[in-house]
Image (cartoon, helix red, strand yellow):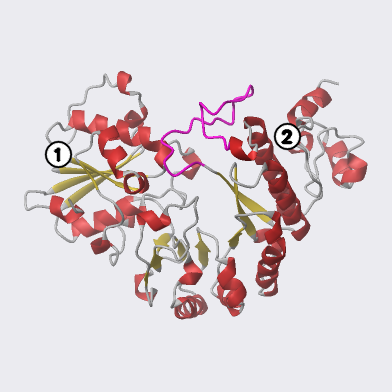
Amino acid sequence: MDFDDWITEDVKNVLLVEPNFPIPNKSRNHSNFLPIGLLKIAAYLREKSINVKLIRFDENNNLDLAQMTLDLTPQDDFIPDLICVTSIFTYWSKYVKNAVFYYKNKYKNVPIIVGGIYASLMPKHCKEYTKCDDVITGYIKGAEEIIPAYDLVDVDYQILHTSRGCIRKCGFCGTYIIEPEWVCKKTIKNEIIKKKLIFYDNNLLANAYIENILKELIELKKEKKITYVESQSGFDGRILRKKPHLAKMLKDAGFKNPKIAWDYGIIQAPKIKEQIDLLTDAGFNAKEISVFMIYNYEPCYEEMEEKRVKCAEWGVQITDCRYRPLNATYDNYSSYKTKGQSSEDYYIHTKEGWTDSKIRKFRRNIRRHNICMRHEVDYHSSILERKKISQNQSQKYRNMGYDEVKKYLPDAWTPFRFHDASEKDYFKLEKKFTEK
């Protein structure tokens, strides 16, 4: 069934549920995780005079099914006629299942439908695994032209789409499955209600009317109606190279923290450098530019490390993404597991030689790399970062370059050289230092 088929004349109250996904509390209202789909549905239903209630990260939803021994009697006067549960990544499917289970027991005769990324990528699995009443795939077109119900959340920004779908079909991305139709807007100026804008386009620059949209943003910025603009996804470098004037338009429109993608091997380095030069020539500072890199995928650790060193030479940061297959339904990776994990815990791309230790090593390299780029220094030391030495001594070391300071700080790490996966872990070196 389509979403509208569920909105019958008997539906007066709709409960909108964001499951208790494992998102850090500090990121709950971050633009990367805001349940924008539910906010659009809320606005869409309100136009039909339907009452809505949004439940976000209810602590009960995170319980294992065996622990559901709570009093599930409705506690308020809002009794839903329909429940809509959103989903994000396929590997967080268990949180969707827990939410469906919980609300099916709380409101036994109320239908529950699930939508979102997981539902759209794996509708059959979602229906059978969660035991929901229906799965809604894709986005709800009727809700696209309506301002989302931002009053239901506490944010000072708004999320915008100038397009749906993508002109590319990358093997690690499910956009072409979720949104198979490429649809572009000619204008967005009438949708803007806040001064901070976050674009959710999968390929913003591919919009056939991007120049018109950028001109609208430039004018709105001049009129001080907007103060901050960012694209959640990276800019398509192939388009940027074909239309270099877009770089200056992005800068003039007020875009912050521009990102480009380096999806494949080191052979792409000259083209990536060209894209970075276009952005810096347009006025962006190198350290505010970030390069998307997907790891635990086809380039092996060694080649990914070569790419990272290139980014250090260019002075740019890296936005890393650990690869999981599009049909992965679990991911129990934990950064706190000191003894390591196996492919039984999470996906490891062993075909390219990735291992648990290499994945952890590369992620640590990225963290230290970004600290060095942001602060424009040539080394990182956890001993200094955690203030494990006196302030005077710390200042002395901070004035040294890497070649000199490595004589004194065993965990000194520089982003400008290749780091073999087997080299000593800097946490152990830090501990050795503090035990002196």
**Is 326 contained in the magenta span?**
yes
Compared with 374, 363 (above or below) is above
Q: Where is 87 relative to 168, above or below?
A: above
Residue shown at 71%/47% (left/top)?
Answer: 303
Badge 1 crowding class, 10 Å Cα cut-off, few under 14, some 14 to 19, many 20 or more, is some
Snapshot quadrant of residue 268: bottom right
State the residue lying farthest toward the left.
9
- Measured from the top left, where is residue 329 in percent x and y? 41, 36
Q: Residue at x 25, y 49 (%)?
A: 136
Q: Which mark is residue 79?
A: 1
- The answer to whether residue 66 is left or right of residue 262 is left
The mark nearer the N terminus, 1 or 2, is 1
- 397 drawn magenta: no
Q: Quadrant of the C terminus?
A: top right
Give, as a three-letter code, the residue at label 1. Ile
Asked if residue 261 lies left or right of residue 398, the reply is left
Which stretch appears magenta? 324-349
Residue beneath label 2, please? 386
Could you say whether the residue bearing mark 2 is in a helix, strand or loop?
Answer: loop
- Residue type indicated by callout 2: Arg
Q: Secondary structure at mark 1?
A: loop
Whole-percent x, y for residue 134 in the image? 21, 43
Front-most of 378 and 74? 378
